[in-house]
Image (cartoon, rainbow, N blue to C red):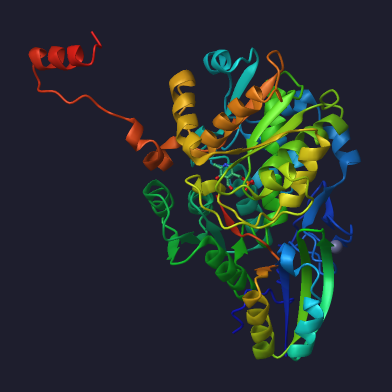
C-alpha cells in the first residue's frame, strides 16, 4: 500500500436509499471551477481538486421560509432545517444549537464596549459547537446508508461524533493524537466508540486518516461528508441574527482552525440577507488564532493570499490545524468583510479563559481564551468601537481543558474549625 | 500503476526551481499540475502523479527531502 499520504482518485460511491429525496439541495458544486456533482459522499472536485460545496435552490426556499416559520420551529439548530442539506424530519438530534446569546456588560465595561454579546456555544450537548456540524453529518451518513462513521479529531469533534453515533445507533471510529487532554479523551470514549490513539503528530494522524478514508467505506464526517458537515456551522450565524432581533452584528470575533466555522458564519448571515430575512449585512468578521498556530491570521497580516502551513505548537489544541482546509476561503471572507485579525500570544490564552469566567460566569476552553484575549487586542487596536454591536463566539467548554487554568486556581485549605478558617482568611486579608 | 494526488507547498528558496520538471526526470512518473498558486515568497501546487507506486513514493520522498511540504489534497482532516 502506498504510504506517501497521497489520495487515490477512486471515489467512493454509495447509492442513496430508495425514495430518498432532498427538496432544496440541487447539487454539489466545486468552489473553484463551479463544476457540479451529484449529491453523494464526495468532497473534492475530480477535475481541479477544489473543495465541493452544497448548492441550494434558493428561489424555492424563499417561497417557504419566513421569520415566522423559523420561530415556530424547535428550540434547536433544526429550526433552520430548510437551509441545511439533509431531511430535517429525520435529524439525529441531541438538541444541539439555539444556545444563549448573552449581553456581556461586565466584560464589556472592562474592555470599553457598550454592546458586547457572548454567543455561548459551550453549552451544546457535547459541549462544543461541533454538535452543529456533526448533527448534520451523521444525519447525512444515515441518509446515504452508511453504518459506520469516523473522524480524526483533537477532541471536540471526537466527543460530538461519538455522542451522535451513539444516538443514531451507528458504529464510530475515532482517531485522536496521543497527547490529547484527559477531558477530551474521556469525553469521547465514554460514548462507546472505537477510540484510536495515534502516536505521532497531527500531520501523521492526518495522513493516516486520508489513507483510511480511501480504503474503507466509512462516513468520515470531515472528509467524504465535509461539504454537508461544514454547512452545520451556518446555524451559528442564523441564530445570532435571530437572537439579535433579525439583524447581523457589526462585528463577529471568531476562533479559526480549519477556517470552516468562520466562513460558514459569514455565509449564514449572507443567506439570511439574500432571502430578505435580515437587512444588509455589514458585519466585520475578525479572525483569532493562537500565536503557536496562526497560518490564516499570519497570511492576512502579511498581505498574502497563500496560507503557509505551519507546525502547530499551542496550548489551544482544538485550534491546532497547521494546514487549514478552508483557510483560503476564510481569508477571503476576512478581506471581503473588512475584518481584522489577531494572533494571540500563548501566555494570554489562559488569561482570556480566566477573564471570561470572572466577568461573565462562563467557563470556556482554550479556543474561547483565544477569542477573549483576541477581542481585547482588537479593541485596543481600534478595530472595534465602543458603541458597535459585537458578538464574541465562545465555541467550547472549559471543563475539557482544565489543565490550561489549573495553575490559576488556589483553594484555601483549612482545618474544620472556626479558628482555622478565621486565621486563614486574615492571613490573606479576605475578612 | 497508481495515481496519487498531492499538494506541494514550496518555501521561498524553492519557488524559482523547476522542481516538478526535475521530479518527472529523476523518477518514472508522469506529473500533471491541476491547480497552483505561486507568489514571490511561497507557492503551492496540486499535482497528480502517475506511475509505479514505488516510483511515486521515492519521488515524493525526494521532494520532501528538499524542504517541500507534501500533503494529501484533502488537506487537514484532524479537527478540533
Ligand atoms: C472549540 C473550537 N472552536 C473553534 C474551532 C475551529 O473551527 P474550524 O475548524 O471550523 O475553523 C474548533 C475546531 O476546529 C473547536 O474545537
Ligand atoms: Zn473544480
Question: Is A101 in front, or is A217?
Answer: A101
Classify A139 as above or below A401: below
**Image quarter of residue A306:** bottom right
Residue A260: percent from left, percent from top: 69, 47
Residue A12, x across and y down, in percent: 70, 71
Which quarter shows the C terminus of chain A? top left
Quadrant of the image where one finds ligand 2: bottom right
Is A372 positioned to the left or the right of A181 in the image? right
Q: Nearer the viewer, residue A349 or A403?
A: A349
Residue A82 relative to residue A313: left or right: right
Residue B56 lies in what quarter of the image? bottom right
Residue at 75%, 91% (x, y): give it. Answer: B28
Estimate the x, y position of residue A288 in percent, counting from the top left: 63, 38
Quick check: can you spot residue A75? no
Left or right of A315, for residue A248: right
Q: Tell me the quadrant of the picture where the N terminus of chain A can be found.
A: bottom right
Image mark count: 0
Q: Is residue A36 above or below residue A255?
A: below
Residue shown at the point (49%, 20%) measured from the top left: A360
As drawn, A424 above or below A236: above
Q: Specify whether residue A117 is in view.
A: yes
Residue A316 lies, with reference to residue B70, above or below; the image says above
The residue positioned 56% from the left and 47% from the top of the image is: A319
Instruction: State the image coordinates of residue A148 (x, y, percent, origin top left).
Output: 55, 64
A5 or A294: which is nearer to us?
Answer: A294
The residue depicted at 59 percent of the width and 47 percent of the height is A92
Amino acid at each position: 500500500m502506498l504510504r506517501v499520504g497521497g489520495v487515490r482518485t477512486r471515489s467512493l460511491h454509495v447509492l442513496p436509499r430508495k425514495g430518498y429525496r432532498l427538496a432544496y439541495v440541487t447539487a454539489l458544486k466545486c468552489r473553484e471551477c463551479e463544476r457540479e456533482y451529484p449529491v453523494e459522499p464526495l468532497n473534492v472536485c475530480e477535475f481541479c481538486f477544489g473543495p465541493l460545496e452544497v448548492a441550494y435552490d434558493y428561489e424555492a426556499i424563499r417561497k417557504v421560509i419566513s421569520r415566522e416559520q423559523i420561530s415556530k420551529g424547535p428550540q434547536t439548530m433544526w429550526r433552520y432545517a430548510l437551509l441545511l442539506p439533509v431531511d430535517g424530519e429525520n435529524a439525529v438530534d441531541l438538541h444541539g444549537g439555539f444556545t444563549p446569546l448573552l449581553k456581556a456588560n461586565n466584560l464589556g465595561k472592562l474592555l470599553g464596549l457598550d454592546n458586547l454579546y457572548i454567543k455561548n456555544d459551550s453549552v451544546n450537548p457535547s459541549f462544543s459547537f461541533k454538535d452543529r456540524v456533526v448533527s448534520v453529518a451523521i444525519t447525512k451518513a444515515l441518509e446515504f446508508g452508511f453504518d459506520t462513521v469516523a473522524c480524526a479529531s483533537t477532541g471536540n469533534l471526537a466527543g460530538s461524533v461519538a455522542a451522535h453515533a451513539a444516538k443514531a445507533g451507528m458504529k464510530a471510529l475515532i482517531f485522536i493524537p496521543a497527547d490529547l487532554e484527559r477531558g477530551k479523551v474521556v469525553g469521547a470514549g465514554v460514548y462507546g466508540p472505537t477510540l484510536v490513539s495515534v502516536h505521532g503528530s497531527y500531520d501523521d494522524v492526518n495522513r493516516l486518516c486520508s489513507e483510511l478514508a480511501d480504503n474503507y467505506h466509512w462516513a468520515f464526517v470531515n472528509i467524504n461528508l465535509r461539504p454537508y458537515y461544514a454547512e452545520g456551522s451556518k446555524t451559528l450565524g442564523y441564530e445570532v441574527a435571530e437572537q439579535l432581533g433579525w439583524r447581523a452584528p457589526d462585528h463577529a470575533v471568531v476562533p479559526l482552525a480549519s477556517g470552516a466555522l468562520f466562513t460558514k458564519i459569514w455565509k449564514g448571515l449572507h443567506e439570511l440577507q439574500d432571502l430578505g430575512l435580515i437587512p444588509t449585512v455589514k458585519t466585520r468578521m475578525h479572525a483569532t488564532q493562537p500565536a503557536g498556530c496562526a497560518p490564516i491570521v499570519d497570511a492576512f497580516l502579511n498581505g498574502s493570499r497563500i496560507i503557509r502551513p505551519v507546525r502547530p505548537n499551542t496550548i489551544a489544541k482544538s485550534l491546532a490545524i497547521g494546514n487549514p482546509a478552508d483557510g483560503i476561503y476564510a481569508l477571503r471572507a476576512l478581506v471581503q468583510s473588512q475584518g481584522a485579525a489577531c494572533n494571540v500570544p500563548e501566555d494570554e490564552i489562559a488569561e482570556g479563559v480566566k477573564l471570561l469566567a470572572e466577568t461573565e460566569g462562563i467557563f470556556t476552553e482554550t479556543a474561547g481564551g483565544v477569542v477573549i484575549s483576541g477581542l481585547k487586542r482588537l479593541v485596543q487596536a481600534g478595530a472595534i468601537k465602543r458603541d458597535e454591536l459585537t458578538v464574541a463566539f465562545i465555541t467550547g467548554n472549559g471543563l475539557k481543558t482544565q489543565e490550561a487554568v489549573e495553575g490559576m486556581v488556589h483553594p484555601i485549605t483549612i482545618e474544620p474549625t472556626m479558628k482555622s478558617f478565621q486565621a486563614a482568611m486574615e492571613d490573606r486579608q479576605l475578612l | 500503476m497508481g495515481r496519487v494526488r498531492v499538494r506541494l507547498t514550496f518555501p521561498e528558496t524553492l519557488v524559482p526551481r523547476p522542481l516538478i520538471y526535475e521530479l518527472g526526470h529523476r523518477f518514472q512518473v508522469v506529473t500533471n499540475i491541476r491547480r497552483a498558486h505561486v507568489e514571490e515568497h511561497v507557492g503551492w501546487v496540486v499535482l497528480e502523479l502517475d506511475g509505479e507506486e514505488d516510483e511515486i513514493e521515492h519521488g515524493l520522498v525526494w521532494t520532501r527531502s528538499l524542504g517541500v511540504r507534501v500533503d494529501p489534497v484533502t488537506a487537514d482532516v484532524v479537527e478540533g
